[in-house]
Each structure stands twice: as structure tokens, then as C-alpha cells.
Amino acid sequence: MTLLERDPQAPAAWRGNLPVTSRYTYGIAGEKFFRALKDEGKIMGAECPTCGITYVPARAFCERCLSELTEWTDVGLVGELHTFTLVFVDYDGRPLYEPELVGFVSFGDGGIVHKLEADPDTLEIGMKMEAVLKPKTKRTGSILDIQHFKPVK
């Protein structure tokens, strides 16, 4: 039976609680990326041996040629500001008390969207931005282990 075919014995509706036993995971590449961020304070990229593209955050396979990405490299904590904006509403559309500065900081052929800690009037596209990490004892293995990015002095 294919996914588009319906099992005639399947219930038309499910009443009560749906038993869910799975959990979201980062996947193999995500796990390795966030573990390196947490344990070593490194931002890791994966380089495609066929295309030469460096993916940040690192991935398991190249999305262009589908090669397996086994070459991982530390891309450092300093990237380049690609774009930025002030955000005036939260995820639910409610106004923020103070606007937040958010930007895309590029590393290799990818990058990270994150909070920026800077005066927006001093920012320029292409300027170097450095990741400010939480202290090692407070890192949990998430993108929030990066507190924010700040301009390199």
C-alpha cells in the first residue's frame, strides 16, 4: 500500500489522547554541530568534496549534488554581516517593549540568523561580527549558546 492509499481497516477518527512516543532530534549533523558549539565553543561547517561548498551550520549531505559531507571544519567565531533588521514584534505579532536587532552573519557558503548587540547606525554590510558565547557551564547545546553577535573591534 502506498502513502496515498487508505487502509480500509484504519479508524476514521481517533478519540482521546494520541499516543506519541517519538521526540524531535537534531539529526546526526545537527547533533555534531550543537555538541561542538556546547563542548568546544566552535561553529562547525561541513565542506562538500565535490562542489567545494562549505555549509554552516554543518549538514550531513550536500543539497546540490547529494554527496555525503564527512569533512568538518571549524569556521571560527567571526563571520561577515550579510544583512540586518530591527524587529518590532514578537513571534505572535505582539509589539516588543524594545525592538531587537537581528542579522544574518555569513560563514562559508551559509550562516546564522541571530541577535546582534550593536548600535544599528554603526553597522555596515560586510563588517566582521563575532559570536559571543555563553560561559561553558551554562551552554545547553542549542543555538542560544550563542548569546549574540557583536562587531569586531
Image (cartoon, rainbow, N blue to C red):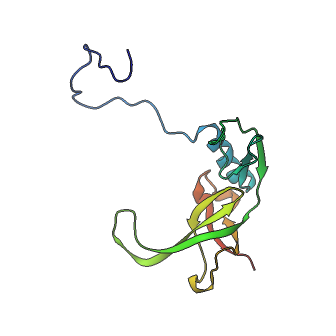
Q: Is residue 79 above or below residue 46?
A: below
Residue at x 78% of width, y 49% of height: 73
Residue 35's spot in the image, x, y percent?
68, 47
Q: Identify which residue, 26 or 140, lies in the foreground.
A: 26
Q: Is residue 147 above or below residue 18?
A: below
Q: Is residue 14 above or below residue 113?
A: above
Q: Is residue 42 above or below residue 50?
A: below
Q: Quadrant of the C terminus?
A: bottom right
Q: Quadrant of residue 30?
A: top right
Q: Quadrant of the N terminus?
A: top left
Which residue is at the far bottom? 121
Report the label total.
0
Residue at x 51% of width, y 74% of height: 85
Residue 113's spot in the image, x, y percent?
57, 62
Q: Is residue 96 visible?
A: yes
Q: Is residue 134 visible?
A: no
Residue 116's spot in the image, x, y percent?
59, 72
Residue at x 66% of width, y 63% of height: 106
Horizontally, is 51 left or right of 28 in the view? right
Residue at x 34% of width, y 23% of height: 4
Q: Identify which residue, 68 or 51, lies in the foreground.
A: 51
Residue 115's spot in the image, x, y percent?
56, 69
